Image (cartoon, rainbow, N blue to C red):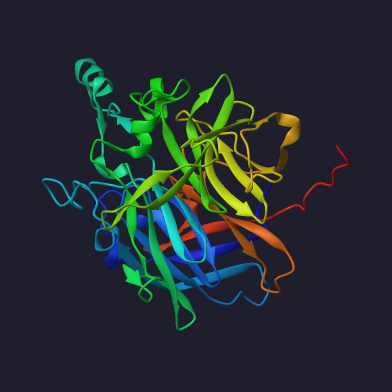
Amino acid sequence: MHPTNIVLLEFHPEQDNLTHDKELRDGLSVALRMGNTIWLANDESVSLERVTLCEEDSRGKSSFTRDHTQFRLHDYLDLPLPPHGETREDINEADIEGLACDNKYLWLTGSHSLRRKQPRPDDGAKKAHKRLCSVGADGNRYLLARIPIVEEAGAYTLVKETGQEGKRRSAAMLRGDEHGNELTALLKDDEHFGPFLHIPGKDNGFDIEGIAVAGKHLLLGLRGPVLRGWAAILEVALVDDEQPGRLKLAPVDAEGALLRKHFLDLGGLGIRDLCAQGKDLLILAGPTMDLDGPVHVYRWVGGAQPGSEPVMHADQLERVLSLPYGVGVDHPEGMTLFQSGDGKEEALMVVYDSAAPSRQIGDSTIVADVFPLPARRKRGKA
Protein backbone atom coordinates (compact mmCIF):
# COMPACT_ATOMS: atom_id res chain seq x y z
CA MET A 1 0.00 0.00 0.00
CA HIS A 2 1.25 3.48 -0.84
CA PRO A 3 1.04 6.39 1.63
CA THR A 4 -1.53 9.12 1.01
CA ASN A 5 0.28 11.76 3.09
CA ILE A 6 3.76 12.44 4.38
CA VAL A 7 5.23 14.22 7.39
CA LEU A 8 8.57 16.02 7.14
CA LEU A 9 10.42 15.49 10.43
CA GLU A 10 13.13 18.11 10.90
CA PHE A 11 15.95 17.74 13.44
CA HIS A 12 18.56 20.25 14.56
CA PRO A 13 21.98 19.04 13.34
CA GLU A 14 23.68 20.44 16.46
CA GLN A 15 21.65 18.03 18.60
CA ASP A 16 22.74 15.05 16.53
CA ASN A 17 25.03 13.39 19.09
CA LEU A 18 25.46 9.98 17.48
CA THR A 19 28.59 8.63 15.86
CA HIS A 20 30.11 10.29 12.79
CA ASP A 21 28.54 7.76 10.41
CA LYS A 22 25.02 7.73 11.90
CA GLU A 23 22.43 10.50 12.17
CA LEU A 24 19.38 10.79 14.40
CA ARG A 25 17.06 10.65 11.40
CA ASP A 26 18.79 7.55 10.02
CA GLY A 27 17.47 5.00 12.52
CA LEU A 28 14.15 6.09 13.99
CA SER A 29 12.79 3.23 16.07
CA VAL A 30 9.57 4.63 17.54
CA ALA A 31 7.04 7.45 17.22
CA LEU A 32 4.21 8.75 19.41
CA ARG A 33 1.89 11.63 18.57
CA MET A 34 0.19 13.62 21.34
CA GLY A 35 -1.78 16.54 19.94
CA ASN A 36 0.70 18.59 17.93
CA THR A 37 3.65 17.02 19.74
CA ILE A 38 5.48 14.08 18.18
CA TRP A 39 7.95 12.06 20.27
CA LEU A 40 10.66 10.09 18.46
CA ALA A 41 13.75 8.07 19.32
CA ASN A 42 16.76 6.66 17.55
CA ASP A 43 17.70 3.13 18.63
CA GLU A 44 21.38 4.07 19.04
CA SER A 45 20.82 7.01 21.38
CA VAL A 46 20.05 7.70 25.05
CA SER A 47 17.57 10.49 24.40
CA LEU A 48 14.06 11.27 23.25
CA GLU A 49 13.38 13.77 20.48
CA ARG A 50 10.37 16.11 20.44
CA VAL A 51 9.12 17.99 17.39
CA THR A 52 6.03 20.15 16.91
CA LEU A 53 3.60 19.46 14.09
CA CYS A 54 2.75 22.45 11.91
CA GLU A 55 -0.26 22.93 9.66
CA GLU A 56 -0.72 20.85 6.53
CA ASP A 57 0.08 22.27 3.14
CA SER A 58 -2.71 23.65 0.97
CA ARG A 59 -3.34 20.25 -0.64
CA GLY A 60 -3.47 18.41 2.69
CA LYS A 61 -0.86 15.95 1.38
CA SER A 62 2.03 16.78 3.69
CA SER A 63 2.73 18.17 7.14
CA PHE A 64 5.84 19.75 8.60
CA THR A 65 7.50 19.78 11.99
CA ARG A 66 9.66 22.35 13.76
CA ASP A 67 11.13 23.13 17.18
CA HIS A 68 13.21 20.00 17.65
CA THR A 69 14.07 19.59 21.34
CA GLN A 70 16.19 16.79 22.78
CA PHE A 71 15.50 15.23 26.19
CA ARG A 72 18.43 13.26 27.62
CA LEU A 73 17.27 10.23 29.57
CA HIS A 74 20.04 10.67 32.14
CA ASP A 75 18.37 13.92 33.23
CA TYR A 76 15.31 11.95 34.37
CA LEU A 77 16.38 8.37 35.08
CA ASP A 78 19.25 6.74 36.95
CA LEU A 79 20.50 4.60 34.08
CA PRO A 80 23.18 2.04 35.01
CA LEU A 81 25.74 3.31 32.47
CA PRO A 82 26.80 6.88 31.58
CA PRO A 83 25.87 8.28 28.15
CA HIS A 84 29.29 7.51 26.66
CA GLY A 85 31.91 4.83 27.09
CA GLU A 86 35.65 5.23 26.69
CA THR A 87 35.29 7.62 23.76
CA ARG A 88 32.70 10.19 22.77
CA GLU A 89 31.57 7.99 19.89
CA ASP A 90 31.13 4.96 22.14
CA ILE A 91 27.46 5.46 23.08
CA ASN A 92 25.91 3.35 25.86
CA GLU A 93 22.63 3.22 23.98
CA ALA A 94 19.25 2.49 25.53
CA ASP A 95 17.90 0.99 22.27
CA ILE A 96 14.50 2.62 22.86
CA GLU A 97 11.91 0.52 21.04
CA GLY A 98 8.57 1.58 22.50
CA LEU A 99 6.70 4.68 23.66
CA ALA A 100 3.20 4.97 25.13
CA CYS A 101 1.27 7.51 27.20
CA ASP A 102 -1.48 7.23 29.83
CA ASN A 103 -2.07 11.03 30.09
CA LYS A 104 0.13 11.21 33.20
CA TYR A 105 3.34 9.50 32.16
CA LEU A 106 5.32 8.79 29.04
CA TRP A 107 6.21 5.09 29.26
CA LEU A 108 9.27 3.78 27.44
CA THR A 109 11.07 0.50 26.99
CA GLY A 110 14.48 -0.56 25.80
CA SER A 111 14.91 -3.74 23.81
CA HIS A 112 16.36 -5.79 26.72
CA SER A 113 18.27 -7.65 23.99
CA LEU A 114 21.80 -8.85 23.39
CA ARG A 115 23.59 -8.06 20.16
CA ARG A 116 26.08 -9.98 18.05
CA LYS A 117 28.83 -8.23 16.14
CA GLN A 118 28.67 -8.30 12.37
CA PRO A 119 31.62 -8.98 10.01
CA ARG A 120 32.86 -6.02 8.02
CA PRO A 121 33.51 -6.12 4.27
CA ASP A 122 37.29 -5.85 4.72
CA ASP A 123 37.52 -8.58 7.41
CA GLY A 124 39.43 -11.73 6.66
CA ALA A 125 37.87 -15.09 7.52
CA LYS A 126 39.52 -15.31 10.94
CA LYS A 127 38.41 -11.84 11.98
CA ALA A 128 34.91 -12.38 10.61
CA HIS A 129 34.61 -15.60 12.62
CA LYS A 130 35.76 -13.75 15.73
CA ARG A 131 33.17 -11.00 15.25
CA LEU A 132 30.38 -13.54 14.85
CA CYS A 133 31.40 -15.10 18.17
CA SER A 134 31.23 -11.78 19.98
CA VAL A 135 27.95 -11.28 21.88
CA GLY A 136 27.51 -8.39 24.26
CA ALA A 137 24.95 -6.53 26.35
CA ASP A 138 24.40 -2.79 26.53
CA GLY A 139 23.35 -2.27 30.15
CA ASN A 140 21.07 0.68 29.37
CA ARG A 141 18.92 -1.57 27.17
CA TYR A 142 17.35 -3.07 30.32
CA LEU A 143 15.07 -0.08 30.56
CA LEU A 144 11.37 -0.07 31.44
CA ALA A 145 10.43 3.34 32.78
CA ARG A 146 8.02 6.24 33.07
CA ILE A 147 8.56 10.01 32.94
CA PRO A 148 5.88 12.55 33.97
CA ILE A 149 4.46 14.52 31.10
CA VAL A 150 2.89 17.98 31.38
CA GLU A 151 1.42 20.49 28.96
CA GLU A 152 3.05 23.88 28.60
CA ALA A 153 2.11 26.57 26.08
CA GLY A 154 0.17 24.09 23.93
CA ALA A 155 2.97 21.50 23.80
CA TYR A 156 3.84 18.47 25.90
CA THR A 157 7.10 18.28 27.80
CA LEU A 158 8.86 15.96 30.24
CA VAL A 159 9.62 16.72 33.89
CA LYS A 160 11.44 14.71 36.52
CA GLU A 161 8.82 15.45 39.16
CA THR A 162 5.54 17.33 39.36
CA GLY A 163 2.38 17.66 41.46
CA GLN A 164 1.52 18.38 45.06
CA GLU A 165 2.06 16.24 48.15
CA GLY A 166 -0.08 13.11 47.90
CA LYS A 167 -0.49 13.51 44.14
CA ARG A 168 3.16 13.81 43.21
CA ARG A 169 4.33 12.18 39.99
CA SER A 170 7.98 11.32 39.47
CA ALA A 171 10.23 9.65 36.94
CA ALA A 172 11.11 6.05 37.78
CA MET A 173 12.39 2.84 36.22
CA LEU A 174 12.05 -0.86 36.94
CA ARG A 175 14.56 -2.11 39.49
CA GLY A 176 17.70 -3.53 37.91
CA ASP A 177 21.26 -2.89 36.83
CA GLU A 178 23.47 -3.18 33.76
CA HIS A 179 23.02 -6.97 33.75
CA GLY A 180 19.21 -7.06 33.76
CA ASN A 181 16.12 -6.06 35.70
CA GLU A 182 13.18 -7.61 37.55
CA LEU A 183 11.52 -8.60 34.30
CA THR A 184 14.49 -10.53 32.95
CA ALA A 185 14.95 -12.12 36.39
CA LEU A 186 11.32 -13.24 36.31
CA LEU A 187 11.74 -14.66 32.80
CA LYS A 188 14.98 -16.49 33.57
CA ASP A 189 13.15 -19.72 34.44
CA ASP A 190 10.15 -19.14 32.18
CA GLU A 191 9.36 -22.19 30.06
CA HIS A 192 8.78 -20.11 26.93
CA PHE A 193 11.29 -17.28 27.12
CA GLY A 194 14.01 -18.31 29.55
CA PRO A 195 16.09 -20.17 26.93
CA PHE A 196 16.11 -17.10 24.66
CA LEU A 197 17.47 -14.52 27.11
CA HIS A 198 21.04 -15.45 26.18
CA ILE A 199 20.44 -15.30 22.42
CA PRO A 200 20.93 -11.99 20.53
CA GLY A 201 17.77 -10.27 19.37
CA LYS A 202 18.49 -10.58 15.66
CA ASP A 203 19.09 -14.33 16.13
CA ASN A 204 15.44 -14.81 17.26
CA GLY A 205 16.50 -14.09 20.83
CA PHE A 206 14.59 -12.09 23.42
CA ASP A 207 13.85 -8.60 22.10
CA ILE A 208 11.15 -6.12 23.20
CA GLU A 209 9.89 -3.83 20.43
CA GLY A 210 6.71 -2.05 21.37
CA ILE A 211 4.79 -0.93 24.44
CA ALA A 212 1.12 -0.04 24.98
CA VAL A 213 -0.92 0.98 28.00
CA ALA A 214 -3.73 -1.42 28.90
CA GLY A 215 -5.61 0.14 31.80
CA LYS A 216 -3.27 -0.11 34.79
CA HIS A 217 -1.09 -2.66 32.99
CA LEU A 218 1.53 -2.49 30.24
CA LEU A 219 1.74 -4.63 27.12
CA LEU A 220 5.22 -5.40 25.77
CA GLY A 221 5.50 -6.68 22.21
CA LEU A 222 8.27 -9.13 21.41
CA ARG A 223 10.15 -9.07 18.13
CA GLY A 224 11.58 -12.34 19.32
CA PRO A 225 11.44 -15.07 20.11
CA VAL A 226 8.86 -16.24 17.61
CA LEU A 227 7.87 -19.74 18.73
CA ARG A 228 6.90 -22.08 15.88
CA GLY A 229 5.56 -19.04 14.03
CA TRP A 230 3.77 -17.52 17.06
CA ALA A 231 4.60 -14.03 18.29
CA ALA A 232 4.13 -12.97 21.91
CA ILE A 233 3.02 -10.02 24.03
CA LEU A 234 3.88 -9.81 27.73
CA GLU A 235 1.49 -8.13 30.14
CA VAL A 236 2.93 -6.65 33.34
CA ALA A 237 2.01 -4.16 36.06
CA LEU A 238 4.46 -1.72 37.66
CA VAL A 239 4.07 0.16 40.93
CA ASP A 240 6.30 2.46 42.96
CA ASP A 241 9.06 0.84 44.95
CA GLU A 242 10.11 2.01 48.40
CA GLN A 243 13.31 3.36 46.84
CA PRO A 244 12.70 6.71 45.07
CA GLY A 245 13.08 6.56 41.33
CA ARG A 246 12.42 2.82 41.21
CA LEU A 247 9.46 0.66 40.18
CA LYS A 248 8.71 -2.97 40.96
CA LEU A 249 6.55 -5.63 39.38
CA ALA A 250 3.06 -6.06 40.80
CA PRO A 251 0.42 -8.81 40.37
CA VAL A 252 -1.61 -8.74 37.17
CA ASP A 253 -4.42 -10.98 38.44
CA ALA A 254 -6.18 -12.08 41.62
CA GLU A 255 -3.90 -15.12 41.93
CA GLY A 256 -0.82 -12.92 42.29
CA ALA A 257 0.86 -13.74 38.97
CA LEU A 258 3.44 -11.17 37.92
CA LEU A 259 3.11 -11.90 34.21
CA ARG A 260 0.57 -12.76 31.55
CA LYS A 261 1.62 -14.16 28.16
CA HIS A 262 -0.42 -13.61 25.01
CA PHE A 263 0.45 -15.57 21.85
CA LEU A 264 -0.58 -14.44 18.37
CA ASP A 265 -0.32 -16.12 14.98
CA LEU A 266 1.24 -13.40 12.82
CA GLY A 267 2.34 -15.81 10.12
CA GLY A 268 5.85 -16.21 11.48
CA LEU A 269 6.50 -12.48 11.94
CA GLY A 270 7.61 -10.80 15.13
CA ILE A 271 6.24 -7.63 16.70
CA ARG A 272 7.95 -4.36 15.76
CA ASP A 273 5.60 -1.91 17.52
CA LEU A 274 2.29 -1.66 19.38
CA CYS A 275 -0.32 1.09 19.34
CA ALA A 276 -3.58 1.21 21.32
CA GLN A 277 -6.63 2.30 19.33
CA GLY A 278 -9.38 2.64 21.91
CA LYS A 279 -10.03 -0.87 23.23
CA ASP A 280 -8.22 -2.41 20.26
CA LEU A 281 -4.52 -3.00 19.72
CA LEU A 282 -2.66 -2.32 16.48
CA ILE A 283 0.38 -4.52 15.91
CA LEU A 284 3.22 -3.72 13.51
CA ALA A 285 4.58 -7.10 12.43
CA GLY A 286 7.84 -7.73 10.60
CA PRO A 287 10.72 -10.21 10.44
CA THR A 288 12.38 -11.14 13.71
CA MET A 289 15.62 -11.92 11.84
CA ASP A 290 17.71 -9.39 9.92
CA LEU A 291 15.53 -9.43 6.79
CA ASP A 292 13.76 -6.78 4.70
CA GLY A 293 10.12 -7.91 4.88
CA PRO A 294 7.20 -8.58 4.71
CA VAL A 295 5.61 -6.00 7.03
CA HIS A 296 1.92 -5.89 8.02
CA VAL A 297 -0.27 -4.07 10.51
CA TYR A 298 -2.80 -6.21 12.38
CA ARG A 299 -5.71 -5.19 14.58
CA TRP A 300 -6.46 -7.26 17.68
CA VAL A 301 -10.03 -6.31 18.56
CA GLY A 302 -10.19 -5.86 22.33
CA GLY A 303 -6.44 -6.35 22.59
CA ALA A 304 -5.88 -3.21 24.67
CA GLN A 305 -8.04 -4.82 27.37
CA PRO A 306 -7.07 -8.52 27.13
CA GLY A 307 -8.23 -9.60 30.62
CA SER A 308 -6.88 -13.17 30.30
CA GLU A 309 -4.21 -15.15 28.43
CA PRO A 310 -5.73 -15.74 25.01
CA VAL A 311 -4.12 -17.54 22.11
CA MET A 312 -5.07 -15.51 19.04
CA HIS A 313 -5.26 -17.51 15.81
CA ALA A 314 -4.77 -15.86 12.44
CA ASP A 315 -8.49 -15.69 11.66
CA GLN A 316 -9.11 -13.80 14.92
CA LEU A 317 -6.84 -10.94 13.86
CA GLU A 318 -7.51 -8.32 11.18
CA ARG A 319 -4.74 -7.51 8.72
CA VAL A 320 -5.46 -3.85 8.08
CA LEU A 321 -2.33 -2.75 6.17
CA SER A 322 0.57 -4.20 4.21
CA LEU A 323 3.43 -1.69 4.28
CA PRO A 324 6.10 -1.10 1.64
CA TYR A 325 9.75 -1.76 2.46
CA GLY A 326 13.06 -1.50 0.64
CA VAL A 327 15.97 -3.82 -0.04
CA GLY A 328 18.41 -3.10 2.77
CA VAL A 329 16.64 0.20 3.49
CA ASP A 330 13.30 1.62 4.69
CA HIS A 331 12.30 -0.93 7.33
CA PRO A 332 9.01 0.13 9.02
CA GLU A 333 9.93 0.35 12.70
CA GLY A 334 7.51 2.62 14.55
CA MET A 335 3.91 3.80 14.19
CA THR A 336 1.48 6.20 15.84
CA LEU A 337 -2.13 7.23 15.27
CA PHE A 338 -2.32 10.26 13.03
CA GLN A 339 -5.54 12.09 12.16
CA SER A 340 -5.96 14.28 9.11
CA GLY A 341 -6.26 18.04 9.51
CA ASP A 342 -10.06 17.90 9.66
CA GLY A 343 -9.94 15.08 12.20
CA LYS A 344 -12.31 12.90 10.17
CA GLU A 345 -9.89 10.26 8.87
CA GLU A 346 -7.82 8.20 11.28
CA ALA A 347 -4.49 7.07 9.94
CA LEU A 348 -1.07 5.77 10.94
CA MET A 349 2.21 7.62 10.70
CA VAL A 350 5.10 5.21 10.10
CA VAL A 351 8.82 5.88 10.66
CA TYR A 352 11.65 3.79 9.23
CA ASP A 353 14.98 2.35 10.27
CA SER A 354 17.81 2.41 7.70
CA ALA A 355 16.14 5.29 5.88
CA ALA A 356 16.72 5.35 2.13
CA PRO A 357 18.63 8.35 0.69
CA SER A 358 15.45 9.33 -1.21
CA ARG A 359 13.71 9.77 2.16
CA GLN A 360 16.34 12.23 3.41
CA ILE A 361 16.04 15.93 2.62
CA GLY A 362 18.90 18.34 3.17
CA ASP A 363 21.06 17.89 6.25
CA SER A 364 18.39 17.28 8.86
CA THR A 365 14.97 16.28 7.50
CA ILE A 366 13.45 12.84 7.03
CA VAL A 367 10.15 11.79 5.45
CA ALA A 368 7.64 9.74 7.46
CA ASP A 369 4.65 8.16 5.71
CA VAL A 370 0.96 8.39 6.61
CA PHE A 371 -1.37 5.56 5.67
CA PRO A 372 -5.19 5.61 5.93
CA LEU A 373 -6.42 3.18 8.56
CA PRO A 374 -9.36 0.96 7.53
CA ALA A 375 -12.36 0.90 9.81
CA ARG A 376 -12.79 -1.95 12.23
CA ARG A 377 -14.24 -5.02 10.59
CA LYS A 378 -17.80 -5.84 11.64
CA ARG A 379 -18.25 -9.19 13.33
CA GLY A 380 -21.29 -11.30 13.85
CA LYS A 381 -22.29 -12.68 17.21
CA ALA A 382 -20.02 -15.36 18.59
Residue at 44%, 55% (x, y): give it.
107
Visible residue check, residue 84 = yes
Q: Residue furthest right?
A: 380
Depth check, front residue: 238 or 233: 238
| x, y percent for residue 240 | 36, 54
Q: How many numbered tags mark residues here?
A: 0
Depth check, front residue: 132 or 279: 279
Q: Determine the image quadrant of residue 140.
A: top left
| x, y percent for residue 67 | 40, 75
Residue at 48%, 36% (x, y): give it.
259
Residue at 61%, 33% (x, y): give it.
309
Q: Residue furthest left?
A: 86
Above or below residue 116? Residue 153 is below
In this rendering, position of residue 32 left or right of residue 277 = left
In this rendering, position of residue 311 left or right of residue 153 = right
What quarter of the picture does the C terminus occupy? top right
| x, y percent for residue 90 | 19, 46
Depth check, front residue: 241 or 245: 241
Above or below residue 112? Residue 105 is below
Q: Residue furthest bottom?
A: 153
Above or below residue 323? Residue 24 is below
Above or below residue 186? Residue 127 is above
| x, y percent for residue 186 | 38, 32
Visible residue check, residue 12 = no
